[in-house]
Image (cartoon, coloured by chain):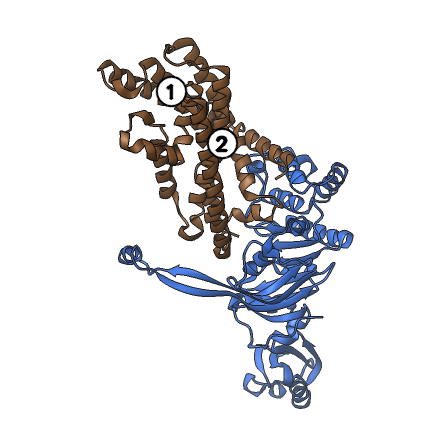
Chain colours: A blue, B brown
Amino acid sequence: MIHVDRLSRTFVVHEKAPGLAASLRSLVLRKKVEKRAVREVSFHVGEGEIVGLVGANGAGKTTLVKMLAGIVHPTSGDARVLGHQPWKRANELRRQIALVMGQKASLWWDLPAADSFLLLREIYQIPEADYRRRLDYLSGALEVRDELGVQLRRLSLGERMKMELIATLLHAPKVVFLDEPTIGLDLTAQRTIREFLLQYRADHKPAMILTSHYMEDIEELCERILLIQEGRLVYDGPLEEVVTTYAPFKTLTAHFHVGAEASSLPSAEELPGEVLDLDACHVRLQVPRGEVSRSAQELLQRFPVADISIEEAEVGSVIEQIFRDGQLRDEPQREPAP
Amino acid sequence: MRPRLFAQVLSIEARKSMSYRIDFWINSLVGILAQFVLVYSLWASIMGAGGAKDSGYSFEAIVLYYVLVILLGKLVGSGYHQGEVSSDIYDGTLSRYLLFPSSYFAFKYAQRLGSLTPVLAQVVVLGLAYLLFLPHPDDVSPTTATVAMGCTSLVVASLLFHSLSWLVQLVAFWADNVWSLVVMMLFVARLLGGSMIPLSMFPAWSQGWLVVLPFRYLYGFPADTIMGRVPTEEWLLGLAISLAWVAAIGLASSAVWRRGMLSYSGVGI
């Protein structure tokens, strides 16, 4: 449903040094800087798939979503959404896609959501019976039926976001772009929205692309993720495989025999790995992925080990690390999934 | 845009403008009454001192002219704040409209008309005040025909203003903030459109230019038409010139829009 082929976007931005002198200078001379927001990104998304778009701030996720939603033109490359080039904004395509912008309200602030929904019914030419059925289903599932008549600005952030979701899905789009749909919401509201999205996916089979900085969103909703680093797609595959690709270490934990002599226990220098934790009962080591078996063998042979376990890093912590560092290992871009 | 959708957008904007009762009445009445009192006092002084004798207007006629110019000007160029399109581009709100399967231009035009609801209250109040309390001229004679012709001019003027304002605001694709440009455009439009001073008071050498420029058709032309000061042939010519400007500005806007969209980055989301 979504085919992206070497899509790139470069922005020209003006840079100005801080201070009054620089402000005066910028009235006459401005320094233009090219910023490559998205670089030759390729991937496919099929029907019923929810794909997580993951990367640090400024990695190019939102620009990519904006291009696929037809808001922004690419500098080069091609994309097809339901067979259309999105930036040509054919009405036939626009009737079948939707974008939720968690950081930007799309409903009318001074009106009750119900008024905005009536306008959307007209914009998308939704038949009256379908409109009533969908509004009833969506407002019921998101538990905001009683708030439909309340002026939008008087609703809580969570309720407003739910109204945004209803507005997005009223016309039953086949492709949905969700840009930070749970940003700023409390845990209950986040969970409600996640459960709702899973149910909506099961019922309607749309293709969805989700960007979120909340790992729970990614872990619960997406089986597949796209990792973006500095505009490049550096990983496209199952969520679980992120760990094997981007967590170079495993955690090795050994418990010593009860009552083992202190002289037989290892010192930190003797251990085959970086020590995370060490006492008379156990040791936790961070070991390079390729050396796990040798390190485990060494521990078993040299020290009074009663029990040993090997753990993978958690998916969430690996991706959160990527967010924090803004860096990934230098991996060649994979071929798009067939 | 389908007429039903146009009507729905117009209706939602009208509802928005009536959401806040105090703001509605202040917006509707206070500004326009202050504006009219100022203009009335000024012209009473000028005419009282024997000025503007060659303008072609008696004092009563000039009062009617300003009542019409103020009210028609509100209908033509009022509504949502003048920098709405450039603001949409500047803060990324345009993105929302780009997602809709409808024309952004028509959407904005419907919003503008919908937000004119307070102006309708102004028309009623100032219109009644004029009929009840102000002197009526003997030298001009509005008829049903001139009112109908004036209303037609008003519709074209509204479209012309929207097109002109639209073209100027599209500069925001490159300049981000075009508020000064919009204010300048409004000033020029009001000055050369006869909203500040009747165009007959401009120098003789400028009259030819005023006829071919678009601004006259925004304010002075519809007002003079209603007052019966524009012969039918001149009215038809004026209408043709206005429509030619709408077409020319439309073509230019279309090219600027296409070019601007290439550089639009949808900031703010």
Q: Can residue A321 be seen in this view?
A: no
Residue hosting label 1: B65
Q: Residue B226, relative to residue A336: is it above or below?
A: above
Q: Can residue A99 be seen in this view?
A: yes
x, y (%) of residue B128?
45, 13
Q: Residue B87 carries which label?
A: none
Closer to the camera in the image, B57 or B84:
B57
What is the three-letter code of the residue carrying label 2?
Answer: Val
Q: Quadrant of residue A136?
A: top right
Residue hosting label 2: B156
Closer to the camera in the image, A93 or A65:
A93
SS under mark 1: helix
Side of B197 where A79 appears, left or right: right
Side of A282 where B169 appears, left or right: left
Q: Which chain carries label 1?
A: B
Q: Quadrant of residue A127?
A: top right
Q: Which residue is drawn at 37% across and 10% down?
A: B138
- Quadrant where the N terminus of chain B is found in the figure: top right
What is the three-letter code of the residue carrying label 1?
Answer: Tyr
Side of B40 where A235 appears, left or right: right
x, y (%) of residue B119?
48, 25
Q: Residue at x 29, y 21 (%)?
A: B55
Q: Residues within 10 Å of mark 1 (few under 14, many from 20)?
A: many
Distance CA(mark 2)–CA(mark 1)? 19 Å
